Structures are given as structure tokens and as C-alpha cells.
Amino acid sequence: MADAMAPHAAPHGEAGETRRDFLKLTTGAFAAVGVGAIAWPFISSMNPARDVLALASTEVDLSPIAVGQAVTVMWRGKPVFVRRRAEEEIKAAREVPLSQLRDPQTDQSRVIRDPWLVVVGVCTHLGCVPLGQKPTDARGDYGGWFCPCHGSHYDTSGRIRLGPAPANLAVPEYNFTSDTQIRIG
């Protein structure tokens, strides 16, 4: 009699195991979807807000900037100096031997198109905003920018020349979208 039950018990046991495997897979899938549905809002909350994304890039119209004039625009909460340099300023910046620079960079490596210089207006010493944007501002010994807090002097290419700042004013990522327009960021 045991032999008569054995053939019948094997297929029934396999069907039970198949059903159990199906239930385990279905439960696991529902659990994964549930965890994803709960985790998604938390992960999504880590993305930058719309106002931050709006500051990721900024457009600057260069047409009203006269030769020798500079403007300050805000980008990612930092001031960015955009200066239309005079020929004399460009010439002075390019004549400086790299051996005289603390943070050696050529003027050509810091500009995309003459006469425009675009730098982040934050002193690399302690994060102050240097003077030199207004015609009445002190521009330091090298005609660029001067940070009165600790005495850092930058030249007309935004390179550190004197004082405690360890590096040049940073050049942000930017490109020309037309002859009179740039996009920073």
C-alpha cells in the first residue's frame, strides 16, 4: 500500500513546492515594490530644489559693458566678476613671467575670448570679496583686485601677486552663446 501512495504523493508534493515558490516570489516582489514606494520620496528629497537648479547657470549680456568696466553677477550664491579689459590690461597680464607668479597660469589659459575676463570674486585666502569692480575701488599694486581684509593683490588676469592668498581667483565654467552673451555654469 505504501507503493500505491508513493507515486501519488510525489506529484502533489511538487505542486505544493511550486505553489510555495510562487507565493515567496510574489511576496518578495510586493515587498520590493513597497520598499521602493516608501524610499522614493526620501531619495527624491535629496535632489536640489528648483531654485537651486535655476542658479546652476546664469546668462550675462556683455553689450552694455564698456572697455575697462566690470560687472558683478551672482552665480550659485557667489559673486562673479566679468571685466572687459583694455588692451593695456591684457598686454600687462601677458608680459608677466610665470616664474613671478605664486600660482602660475598664463593669461591665455584664463580667458576664452579677449577682452573678456570672467572670475569668481571670492578671495582664495579666507573667502572675502575683493575690491576692484567699481572705478573708485582700490585695485591693488597690479591693477586687478585688492582684498583689504588681509592685503591680497590680484593682477588684471585675477592671478595672485602679493599677500596671503594661496591661489588665483577661480575661473568658473562658462561659454559664449553669442558675441554679446555668455552662460556661466
Image (spheres, grey):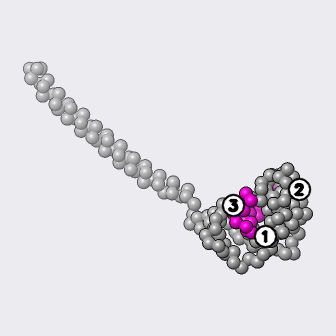
Q: Which element is circle 3 on?
A: loop
Pick out the residue farthest to the top: 2
Q: How many marks?
A: 3
Magenta-colored span:
108-127
Instruction: Give the Cα distance between marks 1 and 3.
Output: 18 Å
Residue 143 image position (x, y, % from top left): 86, 66
- Dot 3, crowdedness within 10 Å: few (<14), some or many (≥20)? some
Pick out the residue farthest to the right: 141
Q: Main secondary structure of the magenta part?
A: loop
Residue 103 image position (x, y, % from top left): 80, 52
Q: Residue at x 22, y 35 (%)?
A: 16
Instruction: Give the Cα distance between marks 1 and 2.
Output: 23 Å
Residue that label 2 marks: 163
Q: The residue under label 3 is which amino acid type?
A: Pro
Using the image, tell me which numbered label, if any, was put on residue 172.
3
Residue that label 1 marks: 85
Dot 1 or dot 3, earlier in sequence: 1
Q: Which element is circle 1 on?
A: loop
